[in-house]
Image (spheres, rainbow, N blue to C red):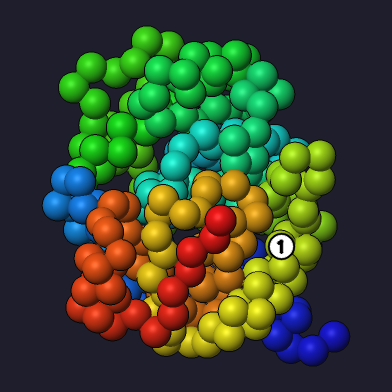
């Protein structure tokens, strides 16, 4: 087996590799044109959020291999954290999966989404998605506030049971990708998009979804390649062009 294949046998290994190489470099920049928010997360800062969230998953939610976390939310820097952190703990992610069949439901503050997430028999956390990750002023009934809860957890994560190549990783409807398959799919998507280390990908958040297929293109593929993501919510075509120039984007992604 080639050395890189051994190193990248699971997606947690992909993250560790990119974190070690990226450090202070930007990984995810989020701009919300409706609020004026701009959040830039380096690999190190994103890693800090991943560690805190993975500790919450492991120590508080007590999720483990075989468990599934359903995440119902739009593309956002916080939901990007939830697309990766469970993988570090060996727990599968189900973007917009069935909350009733999940160990834990994560939902953003939309009445319909929160109502559906209440079907989860386990823990339920709500995402405020407020600027700078602020907690709710009033937490939705039946939920805990992720932004408030996560801050109490440690900045370093050590899994009790590290993921392996055959550990379930990403639920795509009736199909579940194992870590090995997710690593391969992300690398293939990066090659198809022509992404390489140091690229900066502008993503129109209105044109992509927080689901497995789109996540491969706008999050997992750039991460696999060592690229960074500029995720923009709102703004017309002209504004997106100006953001692309200001943020020094080298590629653009707009899925239908």
The answer to whether 31 appears left or right of 179 in the picture is: left
The percent position of residue 126, horizontal first and vertical second, equals 40, 27
The answer to whether residue 252 of the structure is visible from this angle is yes
In the image, 232 versus 90, the foreground residue is 232
**Residue at (47% x, 19% y) in the render:** 112
Q: Residue at x 70, y 35 (%)?
A: 67
127 shown above or below 36? above
Residue furthest toward the top?
141
Residue 241, quarter of picture: bottom left
Q: Is residue 139 above or below residue 224?
A: above
> Callout 1: helix, strand or loop?
helix
- Quarter of the figure that contains the N terminus: bottom right
For the point 40% across and 60% down, the residue is 204
Q: Is residue 1 left or right of residue 203?
A: right
Q: Which quadrant is home to the C terminus?
A: bottom right
Count numbered badges in the picture: 1
Q: Is residue 28 left or right of residue 91?
A: left
Seen in the picture, residue 141 relative to 238 is either above or below; the reply is above
Mark 1, Cα crowd under 10 Å, few <14 / some 14-19 / many 20+, is many
Q: On the image, which quarter does residue 255 sit in?
A: bottom right
In the image, residue 132 lies at what x, y percent? 20, 47
Outermost residue toward the right?
1
Residue at image coords 66%, 19%: 100
Name the image quarter holding residue 88: bottom right
Residue for badge 1: 182
User: Where does residue 37 sit, x and y in percent of width and height?
Assistant: 18, 52
Image location (x, y in percent) of residue 228: 41, 74
């Amino acid at each position: 087996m080639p050395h890189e294949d051994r190193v990248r046998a699971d997606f947690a290994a992909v993250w560790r590799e990119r974190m070690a190489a990226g450090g202070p470099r930007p990984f995810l920049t989020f701009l919300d044109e409706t609020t004026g928010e701009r959040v830039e997360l380096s690999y190190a800062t994103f890693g800090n959020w991943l560690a805190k969230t993975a500790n919450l998953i492991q120590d508080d939610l007590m999720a483990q291999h075989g468990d599934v976390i359903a995440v119902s939310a739009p593309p956002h820097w916080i939901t990007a954290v939830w697309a990766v952190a469970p993988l570090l703990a060996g727990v599968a992610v189900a973007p917009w999966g069935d909350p009733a069949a999940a160990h834990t439901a994560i939902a953003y503050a939309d009445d319909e989404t929160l109502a559906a997430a209440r079907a989860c028999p386990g823990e339920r956390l709500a995402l405020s998605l407020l600027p700078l990750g602020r907690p709710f002023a009033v937490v939705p009934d039946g939920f805990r506030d992720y932004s408030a809860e996560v801050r109490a957890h440690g900045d370093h994560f050590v899994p009790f049971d590290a993921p392996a190549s055959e550990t379930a990783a990403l639920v795509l409807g009736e199909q579940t990708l194992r870590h090995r398959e997710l690593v391969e799919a992300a690398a293939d998507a990066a090659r198809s998009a022509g992404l390489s280390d140091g690229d900066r990908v502008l993503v129109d958040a209105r044109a992509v979804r927080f689901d497995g297929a789109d996540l491969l293109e706008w999050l997992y593929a750039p991460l696999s390649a060592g690229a960074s993501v500029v995720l923009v919510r709102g703004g017309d075509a002209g504004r997106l062009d100006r953001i692309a120039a200001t943020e020094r984007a080298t590629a653009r992604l707009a899925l239908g």
